[in-house]
C-alpha cells in the first residue's frame, strides 16, 4: 500500500511538472482483470486452487502495469524528459519486483499444491 502511495505521488509530481491535470479515467482493462479475479474467487473449489488463481490474476495486472510504465519511460526519453523518465523508471522497477515476487510464489509451493488438489 505504501509503495502504491509513493507511485501515485510520483505521478502527481510528473503531471504537475508537465502541467497536466489527470482525468482519473477508469481503465477498462484493469477493471476487467479485477472482475476476472473476482469471478475466479467465486468459482474456486478450494483455498489452494484459489491462491494459485489469484496469483495468476495478480501477475496479469503486474504485466499490464509493466507494459504501461515501460511505454511511458520510452516516450519520456524520446521526448527529452530525462528526469520524468527516471521517476517513471523507479515505478517500472517496482512493478518488475512485484512481478518477480509473484513468479516466485507461482513457481513455488502454491502451484504444486493446486496441481495436487486438482
Image (cartoon, rainbow, N blue to C red):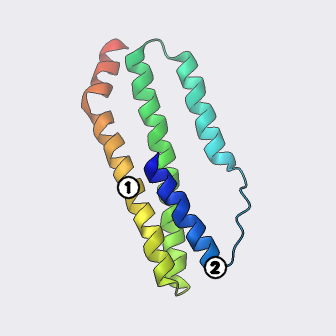
Tell me the crowding category of disc 2: few under 14, some 14 to 19, or many 20 or more residues within 10 angstroms, Cα based: few
Q: Mark 2 = which residue?
A: 18
Coordinates of residue 113 in the picture (x, y in percent) = 29, 19
Q: Mark 1 to mark 2: distance in Å? A: 25 Å
Tell me the crowding category of disc 1: few under 14, some 14 to 19, or many 20 or more residues within 10 angstroms, Cα based: some
Q: Picture quarter containing residue 17? A: bottom right
At 38% from the left edge and 48% from the top edge, which residue is drawn? 99
Mark 1–mark 2 contact, CB under 8 Å? no
Q: Mark 1 = which residue?
A: 96
Q: Quadrant of the C terminus?
A: top left
- In the rendered picture of this protein, how many numbered marks are placed on residues? 2
Placement of 96 over or under 90, stated as above or below = above
Residue 51 vs residue 117, the one in the foreground: 51
Q: Is residue 104 left or right of residue 1?
A: left
Q: Which type of secondary structure does the marked residue at label 1 adopt?
A: helix
At 52% from the left edge and 66% from the top edge, which residue is drawn? 10
Instruction: Indicate which disc, 1 or 2, sits on the residue closer to the N terminus.
Output: 2
Q: Is residue 10 left or right of residue 16?
A: left
The residue lying furthest to the bottom in this view is: 80
Coordinates of residue 24 in the picture (x, y in percent) = 71, 56
Amino acid at each position: 500500500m505504501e509503495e502504491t502511495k509513493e507511485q501515485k505521488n510520483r505521478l502527481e509530481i510528473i503531471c504537475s511538472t508537465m502541467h497536466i491535470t489527470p482525468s482519473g479515467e477508469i481503465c477498462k482493462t484493469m477493471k476487467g482483470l479485477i472482475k476476472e479475479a473476482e469471478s475466479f474467487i467465486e468459482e474456486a473449489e478450494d483455498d489452494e486452487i484459489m491462491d494459485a488463481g489469484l496469483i495468476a490474476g495478480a501477475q496479469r495486472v503486474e504485466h499490464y502495469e509493466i507494459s504501461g510504465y515501460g511505454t511511458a519511460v520510452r516516450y519520456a526519453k524520446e521526448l527529452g524528459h530525462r528526469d520524468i523518465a527516471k521517476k517513471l523508471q523507479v515505478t517500472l522497477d517496482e512493478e518488475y519486483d512485484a512481478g518477480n515476487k509473484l513468479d516466485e510464489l507461482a513457481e513455488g509451493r502454491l502451484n504444486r499444491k493446486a496441481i495436487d488438489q486438482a
